[in-house]
């Protein structure tokens, strides 16, 4: 899909110009236009050599990874789990080329959908690299450049920087060849025999799970001594047990001293508990976090303030140190999540239009799309106690839920953390089937300051997985019915 730049004059003036067409940028552009602001979006992302809106998330991140996760889960269901349902399948194989083609089709549909939404909402789309040039009265001049074409200059009263982030490189192992980041790990043309993953975070776990299900031997190397430190301790403990049972091989507290590409693949030397080991892999995925994408933005030329890690500095209203210039999404740090970026896009567009935009960062949901899935929102039990809060918790297992047993996936539980005095829900943590969908209702209750009693007394359909949420909430007061 090619995004064609709208033919406009060299100095067309807009109320809002967004630099970046990822979740933060395209949502901000659409919402600003809905609010009656003349809006344009500049984006330089390409996929398969063509311009493609949607940023990392839609093109090489959230969406294609979930497509691959779903395909690999179906394969594992057929080859390992179907017999429990009385279904016998002989000789099941994976045609990886068709799996990758399906993934591409999903991505194509969604990215072309954004182009349609821009047209529908009268957002002018420019393809190219957007750079802040200079102020012109109360407006900014932004150049749009693309290789082989003359630069276009555009004027805007308000500029939103939404340029996102890039994968962080490991200095010992620059990307290239058999050393890849998330996009490369979604495009292997054959299943690696031995796959190494550096980083046991969200991306490492999801991508490691994809290729493990499809037949790779997966080893995950993590520098931190503990697993999933951001999650609740009970969830992290259960997750590690489940992943190890599946065959993922973890090493924690490792210190990597050398990474060398060889004719056979990649050699990684690391120390663990004082013992040095060299492991051989066919492919190596680096998933050690992301860094802000400010290259080519012209930050130094115009004096745009960045912090010591390179993120754009903003105030609570997303204003930078430059009048009329704002920033949202990954490029300002915080939770690097597409839905967080989208909410910032909506909030900022509404602020620019004179409304009261707002994002409640205390209830942003986190999801890891492994099997079992992991999801949480709010405080962990440990974090709540570190803040000096007295808490009560309720926990309920999927193994006591009829729908989970019917699915054949009774792994995991839901845990609700509430203030001991007010009963206000402080956090909800889940591991189990479809918890990426179940977390939403708890976020809604938390958004309105609800209590565990509010959640526990809400009628849930039977039989559903959501009843586990209800029972966990009832368990805070030790009122769970089925436990």
Image (cartoon, rainbow, N blue to C red):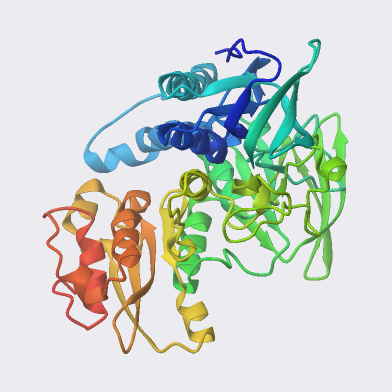
Q: Nearer the viewer, residue 468 or 45?
A: 45
Quarter of the image where one finds residue 7:
top right
Q: Is residue 373 visible?
A: yes
Q: Is residue 477 left or right of residue 211?
A: left
- For image coordinates 48% across by 70% down, the residue present is 232
Q: Quadrant of the C terminus?
A: bottom left
- Residue 154 drawn at (x, y percent): 69, 24
Q: Nearer the viewer, residue 98 or 428?
A: 428
- Residue 52 drawn at (x, y percent): 59, 21
- Total numbered labels: 0
- For image coordinates 54% across by 17% down, the residue present is 97
- Residue 50 drawn at (x, y percent): 64, 15
Q: Is residue 14 left or right of residue 353?
A: right
Q: Is residue 214 visible?
A: no
Q: Is residue 112 left or right of residue 394?
A: right
Quarter of the image where one finds residue 143:
top right
Q: Quadrant of the N terminus?
A: top right
As drawn, 106 above or below 434: above
- Residue 422 drawn at (x, y percent): 30, 85
- For image coordinates 45% across by 57% down, the residue present is 358
Q: Nearer the viewer, residue 86 or 448?
A: 448
Q: Is residue 177 left or right of residue 413?
A: right
Q: Nearer the viewer, residue 310 or 277?
A: 310
Quarter of the image where one finds residue 259:
top right
As drawn, 351 above or below 77: below
As drawn, 417 above or below 403: below
């Amino acid at each position: 899909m090619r995004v064609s730049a709208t033919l406009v004059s060299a100095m067309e003036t807009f109320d809002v110009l967004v630099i970046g067409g990822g979740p933060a940028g395209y949502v901000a552009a659409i919402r600003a236009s809905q609010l009656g602001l003349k809006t344009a979006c500049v984006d330089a992302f390409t996929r398969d050599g063509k311009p493609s809106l949607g940023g990392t998330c839609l093109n090489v991140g959230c969406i294609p990874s979930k497509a691959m996760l779903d395909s690999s889960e179906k394969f594992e269901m057929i080859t390992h789990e179907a017999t429990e349902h009385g279904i016998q399948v002989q000789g099941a194989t994976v045609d990886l080329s068709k799996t990758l083609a399906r993934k591409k089709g999903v991505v194509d549909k969604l990215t072309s959908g954004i182009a349609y939404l821009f047209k529908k909402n009268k957002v002018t789309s420019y393809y190219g690299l957007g750079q802040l040039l200079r102020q012109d009265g109360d407006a900014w001049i932004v150049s749009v450049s693309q290789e082989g074409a003359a630069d276009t200059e555009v004027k805007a009263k308000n500029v939103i920087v939404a340029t996102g982030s890039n994968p962080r490189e490991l200095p010992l192992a620059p990307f290239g060849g058999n050393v890849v980041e998330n996009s490369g790990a979604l495009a292997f043309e054959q299943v690696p025999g031995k796959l190494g993953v550096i980083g046991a975070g969200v991306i490492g776990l999801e991508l490691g799970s994809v290729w493990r299900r499809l037949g790779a031997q997966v080893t995950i190397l993590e520098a931190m001594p503990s697993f999933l430190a951001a999650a609740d301790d009970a969830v992290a403990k259960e997750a590690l047990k489940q992943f190890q049972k599946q065959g993922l091989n973890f090493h924690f507290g490792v210190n990597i001293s050398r990474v060398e590409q060889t004719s056979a693949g990649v050699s990684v030397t690391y120390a663990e508990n004082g013992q040095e080991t060299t492991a051989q892999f066919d492919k190596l995925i680096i998933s050690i976090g992301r860094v802000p994408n400010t290259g080519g933005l012209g930050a130094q030329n115009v004096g745009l303030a960045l912090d010591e890690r390179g993120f754009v500095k903003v105030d609570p209203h997303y204003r930078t140190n430059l009048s009329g210039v704002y920033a949202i999404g990954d490029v300002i740090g915080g939770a690097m999540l597409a839905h967080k970026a989208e909410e910032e896009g909506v909030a900022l567009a509404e602020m620019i239009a004179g409304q009261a935009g707002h994002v409640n960062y205390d209830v942003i949901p986190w999801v890891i799309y492994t099997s079992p899935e992991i999801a949480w929102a709010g405080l962990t039990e440990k974090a709540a106690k570190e803040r000096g809060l007295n808490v009560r918790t309720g926990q309920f297992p999927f193994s006591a839920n009829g729908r989970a047993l019917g699915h054949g996936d009774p792994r995991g539980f839901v845990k609700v953390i509430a203030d001991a005095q007010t009963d206000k829900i402080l956090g909800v943590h889940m591991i189990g089937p479809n918890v990426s969908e179940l977390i939403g209702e708890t976020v809604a209750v938390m958004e309105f300051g609800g209590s565990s009693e509010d959640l526990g007394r809400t009628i849930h359909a039977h039989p559903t997985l959501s009843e586990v949420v209800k029972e966990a909430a009832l368990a805070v007061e030790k009122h769970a019915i089925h436990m």
